[in-house]
Every structure is written in C-alpha cells, then in structure tokens.
Image (tube, helix red, strand yellow):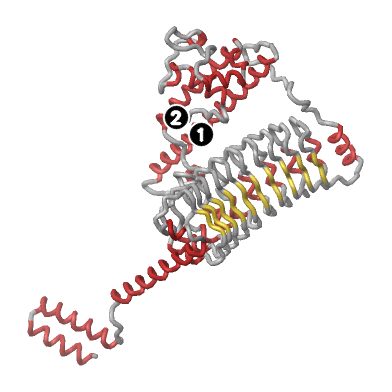
C-alpha cells in the first residue's frame, strides 16, 4: 500500500524521510510541525544517508520551500487513506469484483429471490466498496505525485508555486502540433488519401481531435512521445489497422477504442496504464496486442470471448495477479508472454489454448507454484519458460507435450522431475513425465478393475435381489411366512 519508489519517487522520499509519518498511524498536529519538526526528528530539508543524498542530488527541487509546503499536505492525505486501507484489507480480485457487480445488477432488476440473497447483497456491496476505496487511494497517489512533479519543475526554474499548486506550464518539449501534423490534416481536408500517419519521437503532448476524421487512415504511429491521453475521436478511425502508442505516459485508454473493428495491431507498451478498457474486447480483428511494461493489475474479464483472432499477446512486466478464465477461449493464440508479473496460477481450462506455440511464465517468483492438470493439452507448444518461480512438480500430463523443443526450468525448487533429469534436456524431461503418466494410468486401471463388481446376467442379478428380499422378509415376518413368499417368488420367476 505504500507508494513505490519507482512510480512515486517524491512521495516515497517523504514518507521514508519523516519518522512521524513513517509509522502506522498519523500523528500530525499542524503543517507547521512538518516543516519544522522537533529536534530529535531529522528535517526533510537535510537528507542523511547515501540513498537520500543521491535522490536530492537528482532532484534538488525537493529542498525548495514551496516543494516542502506542498508535500506536507499531500503526505497528510495519503497517510490517512493508507491507514484506512490497512484496516479494510487487500484489494479484491478483479473477477470477484466483476462478479459482485453483476450480482448487484441482477438484484436491482428483481431477478433474484431467496433467503440468503440479502446476505449476498451485503457481501457484494462490501467487495465493490473495498475495490473503490483502493482505486481512490491509487488516484490520490497519482494526483499527488503529478502535482509534486509540477512543483519540482517550477522550483528548478526558480519560480515559487501558488498555494493552490499553481498553473501547469509545459516548459519541457514543444508540445505543439508540428508542421507535419498540420500538413497531413490539410491533405485529409482536401480529400486526398492519407493512409499512414507516423509521428514517433516528436515530443507531442497531445493528439489533435481532427486526427479522428481522417477516415481512410490505416496506420497511426505516435510512439515515444509525451502523450498523457488519447482523444475519444480516435474511435472515428474505422479503417485503422495498426495503432502504436508505445512509450508515452498514458494512464488510460478511451472506451471509444472498441469502435476500431478493423484494428489488427495495437501497441500500448511502456506507458502507465493501470487497466485496459472492457471495450477493447470488441476489437475482434486484433491479431497482436502488446500491453507490456505498464502497471496492469488485471485484464478485462471477458477479453478472450471476442478476441478470437488474437495470435500474439504480450503482457509482461506488469502486476497481474491472475489471468481471466476467458483467456482460454483465445483459440488462435500462438504466443503468450506474462513473465515478470505476480501470477498465482493459471486458469483450470488453460489447456484449451491448443494453438499456443510459445509461452513465457518466468519470473512470477513466489506466486507461481503449480500448473493446471489441463496443461498437457497444449499439444502445439514448442517453447516454454518456467524459470524463476516456485514450482515443485510438473504435472504428469507434461509428458504429452510432444512438440516441445525448448524448455527452461531454472531457479525452481523442482522435485518432479529430479534435477538430474532436467539437466539432460527437454527430451529427457518429456520421457520421464511420460513414464510417470503411463504408470499412473496403469495404477488407475488396476484400481478400477479391483473395485468393480463382477459381471452378471439379468437373471443372476434378479436372483441375488430375490435372495436379499427373502432374507429381509424372513427377519420381519418369521420363518414360515418367508418360505411361502420364497415359493411364490420362485413360481413367478
């Protein structure tokens, strides 16, 4: 719950620097106490230790008086929110939140009845509320860091900051729509065909809305700029096939991206995306999707149901804790890279991805401990990287991966197969796991044969039933009546 030094360097510095705030509870009497702490507490304006000196050297604006005044207010808000979340608990899983919202929607329409409905409503409301609290805390962190970054830049130019945070001024980079953009827009307005717009490395701060009116556009590349948002007008590019937004500072994508029904390639890697819009599932023509190097905590719940043509999916270097079960419906998927995440496992139906050829699950570390039983159904798999996880045993069905050519199992506490088998290569691993699979199938057959009832004809079965009935009658009615009943039943037979 604490701000990460990578994503929130200034806030992390403040929280770790001020002992009165670093503890679990907030003990602040006034902003004045933060600016001039008691003598035992070191001042934030006097760093101590190599790491702090290094940070202040890189960001000398942290020692500016206006920076100090503003960060005290930001810290107070964040610490209060953080303490509240510590009492509420961790953020619920995205699929659990989606399920709770769907349940509440059905309940609001009167589609649910039962004695336990009200209890389930309360539980669902609590799940949604907890998720919203965590989301609000994340927004608070981002807004505070952005304001502090503004203060830092203005302090570096020798300007003080107004009490409200001052006006944002973009002194870095031109941010203007350059002559190339103007020329392309003019061509489109004149009715000339414009199929490609390539504006990478232009230090653009925004995209002009008129770009969404270039109807014949097929390729739009605005990678490696400083874009903070994508206009909704981009949904008007109905013929667009390739959209590259990599290496900007985007925190979200517009819902209108779902209108790009002809989009085949989407690259949003190396941004600050916290989530992908649910509408992205409507981009049914997508073949390649690269959302790597962001801060994604989840993927849209239904992403796999409509992206049936997707062949390559890169989501590595994110914070994914799980993959939605719908991803198992991506029957065209050939490459999946989810390394360096926080995956705790795979969906049980993962084996349905029969077209999958390359899979990278490495570096999920202590979170990834096992593979589903359906893993052996990935009959097309050729490359597999499971390194840097906590997998103790491969499933016996692993022996069915006949096409597997490259396998990396480094840095796992493997017991099955033994390390000496792993050292011999992928062929030895497949052979070992195949033998285990065959042995297990033999044991299963033997167990079934030993426990199955003897085969019998209908007459034999009926005779045994009559005998059992006779015994019961004898116990209830006495010996003489039982004999009569036996004779009667035999005569009937």
**Relative to 316, does residue 69 appear above or below in the rendering?**
above
Q: Residue 282 appears at what percent x and percent y? A: 66, 50
User: Which of the two residues, 313 or 190, is positioned nearer the viewer here?
Assistant: 313
Q: How many neighbours does mark 2 have within 10 angstroms: few (below 14), some (14-19), or many (20 or more)?
A: some
Residue, x 50% and y 66% (percent of image)?
A: 400
Q: Residue 453 appears at what percent x and percent y? A: 28, 78
- Mark 1 — residue? 132
Counting residues from the start of the chain, the first of labels 1 and 2 encountered is 2
Q: Are marks 1 and 2 in contact (CB under 8 Å)?
A: no
The answer to whether 487 appears left or right of 158 in the picture is: left
Q: How many neighbours does mark 1 have within 10 angstroms: few (below 14), some (14-19), or many (20 or more)?
A: some
Residue, x 41% and y 23% (percent of image)?
A: 24
Measure how far apart labels 1 and 2 are at the Cα level: 11 Å
The answer to whether 175 appears left or right of 351 in the picture is: right
Q: Determine the secondary structure under disc 2.
A: helix
Q: Determine the secondary structure under disc 1.
A: helix
Q: Residue 333 appears at what percent x and percent y? A: 61, 57
- Mark 2 — residue? 85
- On the question of residue 108 being in view, the answer is no
Residue, x 45% and y 18% (percent of image)?
A: 21
Residue 272 disc label: none
């Amino acid at each position: 719950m604490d701000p990460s030094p990578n994503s929130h360097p200034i806030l992390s510095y403040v929280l770790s620097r001020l002992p009165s705030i670093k503890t679990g509870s907030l003990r602040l009497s006034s902003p004045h106490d933060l600016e001039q702490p008691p003598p035992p507490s070191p001042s934030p304006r006097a760093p101590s230790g190599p790491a702090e000196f290094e940070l202040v050297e890189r960001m000398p604006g942290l020692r500016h008086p206006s920076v100090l005044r503003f960060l005290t207010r930001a810290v107070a808000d964040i610490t209060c929110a953080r303490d509240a979340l510590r009492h509420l608990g961790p953020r619920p899983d995205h699929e659990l939140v989606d399920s709770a919202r769907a349940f509440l929607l059905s309940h609001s329409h009167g589609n649910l009845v039962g004695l336990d409905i009200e209890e389930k409503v309360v539980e669902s409301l609590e799940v949604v509320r907890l998720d919203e609290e965590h989301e609000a805390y994340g927004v608070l962190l981002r807004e505070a860091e952005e304001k502090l970054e503004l203060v830092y830049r203005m302090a570096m130019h020798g300007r003080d900051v107004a009490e409200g945070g001052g006006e944002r001024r973009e002194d870095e980079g031109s941010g203007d729509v350059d002559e190339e953009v103007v020329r392309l827009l003019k061509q489109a307005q004149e009715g000339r065909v414009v199929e490609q717009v390539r504006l990478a490395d232009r230090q653009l701060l925004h995209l002009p809305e008129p770009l969404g009116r270039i109807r014949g556009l097929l390729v739009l590349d605005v990678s490696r700029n400083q874009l903070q948002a994508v206009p909704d007008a981009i949904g008007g590019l109905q013929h667009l096939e390739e959209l590259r937004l990599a290496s900007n500072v985007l925190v979200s994508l517009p819902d209108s991206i779902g209108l790009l029904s002809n989009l085949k390639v989407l690259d949003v890697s190396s941004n600050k995306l916290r989530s992908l819009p649910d509408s992205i599932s409507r981009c049914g023509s997508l073949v390649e999707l690269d959302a790597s190097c962001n801060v994604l905590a989840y993927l849209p719940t239904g992403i796999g149901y409509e992206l049936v043509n997707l062949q390559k999916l890169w989501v590595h270097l994110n914070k994914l804790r799980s993959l939605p079960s719908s991803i198992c419906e991506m029957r065209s998927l050939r490459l999946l890279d989810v390394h360096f995440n926080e995956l705790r496992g795979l969906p049980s139906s993962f084996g349905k991805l029969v077209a999958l050829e390359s899979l990278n699950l490495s570096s999920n570390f202590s979170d990834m401990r096992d593979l589903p039983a359906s893993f052996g159904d990935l009959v097309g798999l050729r490359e597999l990287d499971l390194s840097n996880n906590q997998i103790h045993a491969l499933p016996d069905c692993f022996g069915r991966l006949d096409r597997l050519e490259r396998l990396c199992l480094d840095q796992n506490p493997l017991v099955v197969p033994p390390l000496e088998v792993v050292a011999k290569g992928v062929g030895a691993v497949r052979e070992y796991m195949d033998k285990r699979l065959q042995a297990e199938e033999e044991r299963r057959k033997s167990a079934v044969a030993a426990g199955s009832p003897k085969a019998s004809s209908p007459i034999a079965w009926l005779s045994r039933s009559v005998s059992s009935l006779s015994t019961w009658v004898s116990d209830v009615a006495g010996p003489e009546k039982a004999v009569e009943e036996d004779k009667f039943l035999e005569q009937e037979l």
